[in-house]
């Protein structure tokens, strides 16, 4: 079971674009954290979901503290894995950067579950059934939460 959970943490990191050594570090940190939580793990419906969320959050935290963005893993201050066209004129580049910063801010305002589901669907390209299985919820709940997240984003860009 531990090896399967470790592989899952590695896969999450790889899908987020982490280099192999960094993915290994995060997977090891996830396993250590699980060991520290061993008495409380039973209260979670799905350990696999817990591992997925922990790996994702630990990797983002590591990137924030290690300043990997300045090394070109992710562009500027954005934590979204979108590339900005470096051949565009400076005005377009600034607009793209501002758009990504705005989008990141709006995404961070979403409830955690909606944010996670939207990320898994749009960035990781997972199906609704796969997301439901990973999070231990019904597939209809995934559709509902995904719809709510999209409506919340749409409402934030619609004129008041």
Image (cartoon, rainbow, N blue to C red):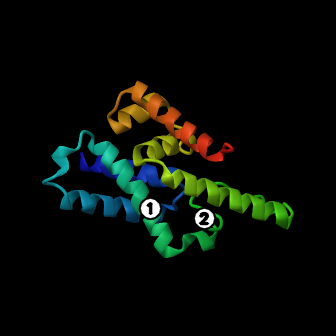
For the residues marked 2 and 1, what is the alpha-carbon distance in whole angstroms? 12 Å
Within the image, what quadrant is residue 116 found in? Answer: top left
Nearer-the-camera pick, 7 or 70:
70
Cβ atoms under marks 2 and 1 closer than 8 Å: no
Expressed as whole percent of the image width and height from the top left, the position of residue 8 reads 37, 47
Nearer-the-camera pick, 52 or 95:
95
For residue 112, above or below residue 18: above
For residue 140, above or below residue 108: above
Residue at figure coordinates x 45%, y 42% from the top left: 114
Expressed as whole percent of the image width and height from the top left, the position of residue 39 reads 12, 54
Is 160 on the left or on the right of 23, as rendered? right
Within the image, what quadrant is residue 45 found in? Answer: top left
Which residue corresponds to mark 1?
Answer: 59
Residue at figure coordinates x 33%, y 50% from the top left: 51
Which residue corresponds to mark 2?
Answer: 73
**Mark 1 residue crowding within 10 angstroms, few (<14) / some (14–19) / many (20+):** many
Nearer-the-camera pick, 127 or 27:
127
Res. 7 visible in picture = no
Identify the element where label 2 is drawn: loop
Expressed as whole percent of the image width and height from the top left, the position of residue 110 reads 48, 48
Res. 128 visible in picture = yes
Residue at figure coordinates x 39%, y 55% from the top left: 55
Identify the element where label 1 is drawn: helix
Residue at figure coordinates x 49%, y 42% from the top left: 120
């Amino acid at each position: 079971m531990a090896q399967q959970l470790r592989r899952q943490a590695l896969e999450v990191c790889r899908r987020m674009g982490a280099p192999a050594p960094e993915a290994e570090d995060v997977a090891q940190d996830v396993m250590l954290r699980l060991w520290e939580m061993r008495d409380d793990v039973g209260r979670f419906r799905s350990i696999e979901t817990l591992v997925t969320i922990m790996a994702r959050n630990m990797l983002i935290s590591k990137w924030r503290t290690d300043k990997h963005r300045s090394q070109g893993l992710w562009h500027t201050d954005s934590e979204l894995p979108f590339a900005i066209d470096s051949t565009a004129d400076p005005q377009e580049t600034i607009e793209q950067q501002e758009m990504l910063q705005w989008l990141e801010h709006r995404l961070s305002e979403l409830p955690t579950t909606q944010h996670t589901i939207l990320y898994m669907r749009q960035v990781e390209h997972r199906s609704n059934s796969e997301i439901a299985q990973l999070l231990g919820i019904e597939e209809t709940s995934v559709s509902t939460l995904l719809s709510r997240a999209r409506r919340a984003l749409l409402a934030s860009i619609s004129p008041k």
